[in-house]
Each structure stands twice: as C-alpha cells, then as structure tokens.
C-alpha cells in the first residue's frame, strides 16, 4: 500500500449524509421513511433566484470569475450586511466560496497545527472537530448546555482559553441544538476577549436569518473591537434554500482574505459563475420568501416541540433558531445512537443521534423540522408508537 498523509486518517464524517443514504436505501426497498435527519430546507429555491442563474447562463457568463467572487456579488454581500446589521464591510474583505463550509475549513487550516488549541462548540457541527484534528491541533470542546438554552456562556468560553489557543469557533443560532446566545452574553464574551488579543474568532452565522420568538440576530461583526481577528461565515444555503448550489460567503480581515484568495487560486479557482449571479438576485431581490420560509419553520417548530414533549421519557426545550429540535431522551432508557438507529430501521423515522455532534451529545437526538408539517406529524405518531411499546 502506498501511504497517504496520516492527517487524512484523522478526518471525521458527517453522519447526516450516512443517514440520508440509509433512508434512501430503505425507500428504494419500498419502505416508507420520514426523513428528519438532513439539515436542509425542504423548500425549492425561490423562482426569481433560479431565473437569475438561467439568465446568466443565457447571457454567456460561462467563464472563470475572480477567485474571490464577482465584484457585484461581493458588493451585494456588503450592501446586505449594511442593511441588516448596519455594519460597513469592504468588498475586499469578502470571499465567495463553494458553500460556507469552505470558510470553516480555511479558518481551521490557517490556525490549526500541532501544539495549538482550538475551542469549538459541543454538541456542534461535526466538521469543526474533524477539521481541527486534521490539522493536528487539539480540539477543546465548549459545552453547550441544555439548562442554558444551548447558548454559549461567556464565562465558560473564556475559561477554556489558554496561551495555546489560536482560534475560537462560535455558532449561534446553532446546529444541532437550535440554541441562540443572547446579545448580553455576546457582549460579555467580547469584553473578555480583550484580554486574549492573539485568539482569532470564527463566527458561524449560517442560521442568522432563522430566529424565532421575535429575537433579533446579534452578529459578531457588530463589534469593531474584534474586527481585526474575526472571520464571519454565512451563505445562501439555509436562508434561500440553496444548499445544492454551493454558494457561501465569509468576511475576513483583509490580509487573511488575501491568504484565502491565494488558496482558492491553488484549489477551486472560483465558484460556479451562474450560482454567483443567483446569489446577487437573492440578496438584492425581494426577501418575502425568506420570511415565508422562516414563518413556516416557526409553525413546525411549535408542532415538533409539543409532540416531542408528549413522548414517554422525552423532554424538549423550544429552540430559538435554525431548524432543529434537540430533545433530551435520557428518560426513555435508550442511548442516543441505538435509538436513532432503531427509529430508522423499525419505525421509519430518520433522526441523528446526539453523539454524532460531539462528546456532550449523548442523551439527545437531533430532529430537523425542515420537513412538511404532515411528515412531522406522522413521524411523531410513529415515535410515540415506538417508544410506547414495551421494551
Ligand atoms: N455551518 C453550520 C453550522 C451548518 O449546519 C452548515 C450546514 O449544514 C454549514 C455551516 C455549511 O453550509 P454550506 O456549506 O452549505 O454553506
């Protein structure tokens, strides 16, 4: 065997994709499977966005673009940040990538190395830990606690920072918990970070447009005192139902954006040009479809939380953002991964076990409510039936 670099053996996986594949296999064999596993909107991309891509293709936008993204798209990102957050960003600090995930990858590659520590949310998006370990850095989990609404605590976050900490990863609204960290807690964290000027910050705000109960999203971009070491990750996937277009953006301090540009030139060159024109239409066009999708997620959120709390041994706090519920299943007597597997194989309901999101995920399941109300209601009936059976 010809040996490949050992770092690749340290890469983790995203089990949501494995569950999706297993659910599809069961469906091919004629089973009726309800998929609450995958983290993507079940809506179609709004038609005016699709039309903009079609028009770009008809107009001959078929070539390579600037590695950082076409200028009108980066300008549209800046105009959107100004409108929504009142924050001024230069298009020279914006990087367009094939999905927001690439920005996460780049940030972790830039700061991770043997001997470095990177603090990341746990339970959290599984790629953080995977990429940290890929670089040889030590992954330091920041526990997201149910009794804190799965928000991060400034005090606990700051307590994990050591002289070896190179990067702090934050994610609010959060996957897999739906937790949203209150602005006052973010204020406290930013105040505390003044004592750690050598720590870079990656704020993953991909669910920033999906908050409920009247909560406004508080972006880390709103704090000028950390702008010289902040990487903001966002994109179109969740807000505009565009997961398959592979379009994301990030905002970097200018010298770091230059590093990412150079890496892009060495790797993916640029994002698919038609998708970039679709991205302009999404940001500059009407936002009513964003609000309509958010309102529908909110309706489903209520149904999921009420239904989960009626299940024997299950309790669920109402998520404040994203489109996931993260019920506590400790009272069922099941461990999370065997329960997720039994629900899929025996009850035909795909969910993800909490341990797929980190060491503190045991005792929880993740259910995505980016599925129709009818599917959610049927899934809850099946789960009630399954959990109500004698063991
Ligand atoms: N960050 C979080 C927390 C996510 O849940 C996801 C997708 O599931 C991403 C980033 C990446 O999104 P994309 O690469 O589609 O922009």
Image: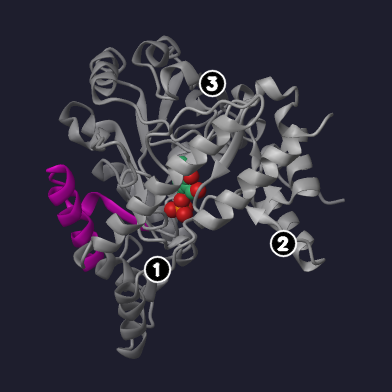
Q: Nearer the viewer, mark 1 or mark 3?
A: 1
Residue 381 in which image quadrant: top right
Q: Is residue 78 one of those drawn in magenta?
A: yes
Q: Earlier in the sequence, mark 2 or mark 1?
A: 2
- Secondary structure beneath dot 3 equals strand
Residue where numbered disc 1 is placed: 45
Highlighted range, magenta: 71-96
Write down the residue under mark 2.
Answer: 24
SS majority, magenta: helix
Q: CA distance from mark 1 to mark 3?
A: 37 Å
> In which quadrant will I find the C terminus?
top right
Tell me the tag on residue 291: none
- Relative to 130, say whether 280 is above or below: below
Using a 10 Å C-alpha cutoff, classify the residue at mark 1 as few (fewer than 14 neighbours), some (14 to 19) or many (20 or more): many
Q: Is mark 2 within 8 Å of ligand 1?
A: no
In this view of the protein, can residue 14 be seen by the observer? no
Residue 187 found in image quarter: top left
Name which residue lies at 20% across and 61% down: 76
> Mark 2 or mark 3, which is nearer the start of the sequence?
2
Q: Residue 337: x, y in percent?
A: 73, 34
Q: Is 390 placed left or right of 359 in the picture?
A: right
């Amino acid at each position: 065997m010809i040996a490949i670099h050992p770092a690749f053996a340290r890469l983790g996986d995203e089990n949501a994709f494995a569950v999706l594949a297993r659910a599809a296999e069961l469906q091919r064999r004629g089973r009726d499977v309800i998929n609450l596993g995958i983290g993507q909107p079940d809506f179609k991309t709004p038609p005016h966005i699709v039309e903009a891509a079609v028009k770009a293709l008809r107009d001959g936008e078929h070539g390579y673009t600037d590695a950082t993204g076409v200028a009108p798209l980066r300008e549209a990102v800046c105009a959107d940040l100004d409108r929504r957050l009142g924050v001024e960003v230069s298009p020279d600090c914006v990087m367009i990538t094939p999905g927001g995930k690439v920005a996460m990858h780049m940030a972790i590659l830039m700061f991770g190395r043997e001997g470095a520590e990177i603090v990341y949310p746990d339970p959290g998006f599984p790629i953080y830990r995977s990429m940290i370990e890929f670089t040889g850095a030590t992954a330091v989990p920041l526990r997201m606690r149910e009794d804190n609404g799965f928000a991060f605590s400034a005090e606990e976050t700051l307590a994990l920072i050591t002289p070896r900490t190179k990067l702090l990863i934050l994610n609010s609204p959060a996957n897999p918990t739906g937790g949203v960290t209150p602005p006052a807690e973010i204020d406290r964290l930013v105040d505390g970070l003044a004592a750690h000027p050598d720590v870079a910050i990656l704020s993953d705000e991909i669910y920033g447009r999906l908050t409920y109960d009247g909560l406004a999203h508080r972006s880390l971009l709103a704090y000028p005192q950390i702008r010289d070491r902040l990487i903001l990750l966002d994109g179109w996937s969740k807000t505009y139902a565009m997961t398959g277009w592979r379009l994301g953006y990030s905002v970097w301090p200018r010298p770091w954006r230059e590093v990412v540009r150079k890496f892009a030139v060495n790797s993916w060159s640029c994002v698919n040009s038609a998708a970039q024109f679709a991205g302009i239409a999404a940001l500059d066009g009407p936002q009513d479809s964003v609000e309509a999708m958010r309102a529908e997620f909110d309706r489903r959120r209520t149904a999921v939380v009420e239904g989960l709390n009626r299940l024997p041994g299950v309790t669920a706090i109402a998520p404040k953002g994203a489109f996931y519920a993260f019920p506590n299943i400790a009272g069922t007597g099941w461990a999370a991964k065997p329960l997720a597997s039994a629900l899929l194989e025996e009850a035909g309901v795909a969910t993800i076990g909490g341990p797929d999101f980190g060491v503190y995920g045991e005792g929880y399941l993740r259910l995505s409510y980016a599925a129709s109300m009818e599917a959610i209601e049927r899934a809850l009936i099946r789960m009630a039936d399954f959990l109500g059976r004698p063991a």
